[in-house]
Image: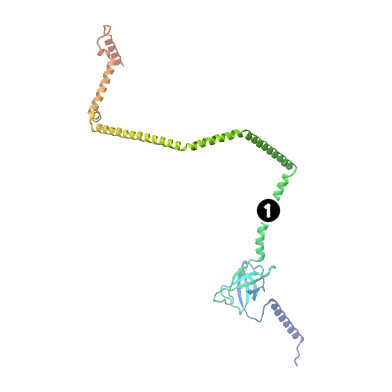
Amino acid sequence: MIKISREIKVGVFAFLGITVFVLGYNFLRGYDLFKSSNTYYVVYKNVDGIVKSTQVTINGLMVGQISDITMLNKGDASKILVTMMINSDIKLPKESKATIVGTDLLGTKVISLTLSRNSDYLNNKDTLIAGVEESLTSTISGIVSPLKDRSEQVLVTLDRVLKSMNEIFDSSGTQKLESGINDFSGIMLHVKNITGRLDELTAEENDKIKEMFTSAESIMHTLKNSNDVISKTLKNISSISDSIAASNLTATINNTNRVMMDFSITLEKINSGEGSLGKLANDKQLYDNLTKSSAQLTSLMKDMEEYPGRYFSVSVFGNSRAAKHDKKRQEEKNNK
């Protein structure tokens, strides 16, 4: 009989214990070491709520778990690589999506696979499309946060209103409010007195007002009865004025046309040289002779005015003082 040493027995029991521990641990995590699986990858920007051994489900059925979570690029936490172990009998179509979803209010999360309708399937170590579902906590926070901000604004406004009311209803504010109420009462009393006086005035002048309305009604009645006569009178006046205006206007227009026609004929005759005015206007030699004669006549009159002795030799007193005077004026003119 082969004798087994104590060291071998201890080693065998230690190996069996470790094996049972590993199998039991993975069994409690839901991972079956004796079942084959495929590896798939997903790249997330945020993996809050998931860890190694987080379940992977399809329609609530567990089909695998996360085996590793690392950074896609060392030192860059903006992209996180998640490795999933999926049962090999599960076929994942291409364009399938792996979404991180919450399962309860405590924040427990799983990765739910949404299978596409693509007829082609992913191979082992292919990458799925990443997705993150907004958690219930985030949803509630998004609803509560605006309400919280508005509530704070309302409280601040209410605090201001209460402070203002407190300032109004202090000792001086109460006195001012009481004084304002008294002033308002006085105003209402004055309004009441004015209303009473108006009522009295209306009562005193009631007869006159009735008489005025009666007279106005009588005038309107008379005008109504005389409406036909007034209409006929206005029509006659309108007809007469239209006739007068039309006749005078027609005669005026005819006379104006006749005068303008005669004036146009006269201008044509003058331009054509007919008559005295036409000859005077068109004969340049006659115009020059008249101009020359006028200049000579002007010169003669000027000479007669300066030297009257040349033209009038008879003196009223019987002497030749006019001739002497003309001679003296001529000498003065020559000496200048």
Residue that lies at the very extreme toward the front in this rendered image: 225
Residue nearest the viewer, comparing 236 with 55: 236
- Say which quadrant the N terminus sits in: bottom right
Q: Measuring 68% from the left and 53% from the top, which residue is drawn there?
A: 154
Residue that lies at the very extreme toward the right in this rendered image: 6
**At which x and y percent is residue 325?**
29, 11
Q: Residues within 10 Å of mark 1 (few under 14, many from 20)?
A: few
Residue that numbered label 1 is attached to? 154
Q: Could you tell whether 29 is left or right of 322 in the image?
A: right
Residue that lies at the very extreme toward the top in this rendered image: 318
Which quadrant would residue 36 be assigned to in this image?
A: bottom right
Q: How many marks?
A: 1
Residue that lies at the very extreme toward the bottom in this rendered image: 1
Residue 219 shows in the view = yes
Residue 73 shows in the view = no
**At which x and y percent is residue 110?**
65, 71
| Secondary structure type for disc 1 | helix
Residue 167 sits above or below residue 219 on the image? below
Residue 150 sits above or below residue 292 on the image? below
Q: Could you tell whether 77 is left or right of 267 in the image?
A: right
The colour mode here is rainbow
Q: Could you tell whether 311 is left or right of 127 in the image?
A: left
Residue 2 sits above or below residue 189 on the image? below
Residue nearest the viewer, comparing 256 with 112: 256
Which quadrant would residue 30 be assigned to in this image?
A: bottom right
Which quadrant would residue 87 be assigned to in this image?
A: bottom right
**At which x and y percent is residue 270?**
25, 31
**At which x and y percent is residue 220?**
51, 37
Amino acid bearing label 1: Val
- Say which quadrant the C terminus sits in: top left
